[in-house]
Image (spheres, grey):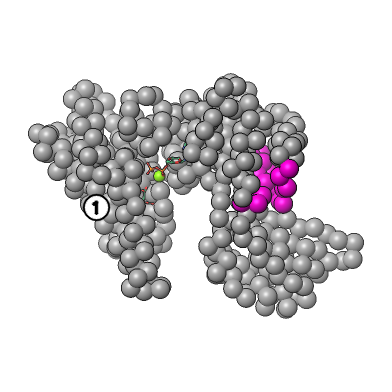
Amino acid sequence: MALIVQKYGGTSVGTPERILNVARRLLATQSEGNSVVAIVSAMSGVTDSLIKLAKEVSNQPTEREMDVLLATGEQTTMALAAMAIQHMGGKAVSLTGAQAGIVTSGVHTKAKISNVTPDQIQKHLSDGAIVIIAGFQGETSDGAITTLGRGGSDLTAIAIASAIDADACQIFTDVDGVYTCDPRIVPTAKKIEAISYDEMLEMASSGSKVMQSRSVEFAKKFGVEFEVRSSFNNNPGTIVKEESAGMEQVVVRGVSIERNQAKVTVAQVPDKPGCAARLFTALADAHVMVDVIVQNVSASGSTDISFTINRDELEKIGDLLDRVALEIGAGEVRKQDGIAKLSVVGIGMRTHSGVAAKLFEALAKGGINIQMISTSEIKIAVILDEEKIAEAAKLAHTAFGLDASA
Ligand code: ADP
Ligand code: ASP
Ligand code: MG
């Protein structure tokens, strides 16, 4: 008898019919002789509607109350899923994150899981119940409700699978697995059979939102192998696991895109120690997350510093940088939105040369201008005009031989 954790995302539980479908799938898995734990997300659109609702009563709701509110989305689904199973004659019990023993840090809206005490899960499993757990939520040691960041039900699933030492962890979603690019952007994208934690992590953190990046980090740290697959069919999905021999032969595993970026340039920054530190300390103090940074040193003793941030963070910056620029004797601060990031990812890059050249050539052929470049050991990322991003993704996908027909 195996112990199986299955996570069902928002679209998979998006309507009462789909919740009934999930209930049938869970019962079928149990009837094959398995113990079953299910993690459920809020029904699709619910988390966004709750955020909107909060903004209708306050333009700055406290993060503590946001968590209390957002946790209700998953709680609705867990009860409905348990009821659906009971209606079909099965045995099921629903648990909130706190009841499931998920203890987190106190950083509201993006709490970290500090430990899981799965006593109640074990007890209900030994009673023969299917245990349905609300994803995305936990509780601090002081009893405050917390949430784990957008897409956080993935993290709940991986953490529970690790805590109960499950034999399998399956992430059910609305696509057949992890593809070489988002299939909604590049229709010729192919399903990847197996991908390493490092590649999945780079793809997730560069815009492939099929998995929450923090959940992949957790899986890598605790060695939780998992499968991403569809809740609408029985096709095998994508296995995410430790790197294995032969995986490096594929130079580029996938292409990710991230829209909604903004570029900020501080012109004529004096080329002397401490100026960059002043700029970026001011941004850090304002909790602005900076992504790609480029500095061009000019002959005249000053430099231009450009960096990218999420477009939503532009508001946080306001005139902060104008003030710092004045203090350090820099020139104008220019802000530009409507940009996006394209990344190509693959552990094979460690041992192959010419990857950057191939990417730049493909974009050049399409007449697409590269505004910034950043690299890591297994990723090359470029900043482009947002209008060109889908075309750029298709060109890169083809150039690296990833198309389904290739
Ligand atoms: P869930 O609600 O099940 O958590 P998400 O919407 O979070 O589902 O993730 C699934 C979506 O991720 C897909 O519908 C797809 O559009 C998108 N996606 C982005 N990049 C990829 C990729 N490389 N492979 C598969 N899906 C991707
Ligand atoms: N409901 C949460 C969200 O929409 C968590 C999740 O679905 O994983 O971000
Ligand atoms: Mg998701």
The residue lying toward the viewer, choosing from 102 and 129, is 129
User: Amino acid type of disc 1?
Assistant: Gln
Magenta-span inclusion, residue 369 = yes
Quadrant of the image for the C terminus? top right
**Pointer 1 local density, CA inside 10 Å: few below 14, some 14–19, many at least 20:** many
**Left or right of 49 in this view: 312:** right
Give the magenta part as a residue range: 367-386
Q: Name the residue under label 1.
A: 75
| Residue 217 rendering spot, x and y as whole percentages | 48, 43
Q: In which quarter of the image is residue 7?
A: top left
Residue at x 33% of width, y 28% of height = 233
Count the labels in the image: 1
| Residue 349 rendering spot, x and y as whole percentages | 67, 32
| Residue 72 rendering spot, x and y as whole percentages | 26, 57
Dominant SS in magenta: strand
Q: In which quarter of the image is residue 326?
A: bottom right
**Left or right of 269 in this view: 74:** left
Magenta-span inclusion, residue 285 = no
Mark 1 element type: helix
Q: Quadrant of residue 12?
A: top left
**Residue 217 appears in the picture as rendered:** no
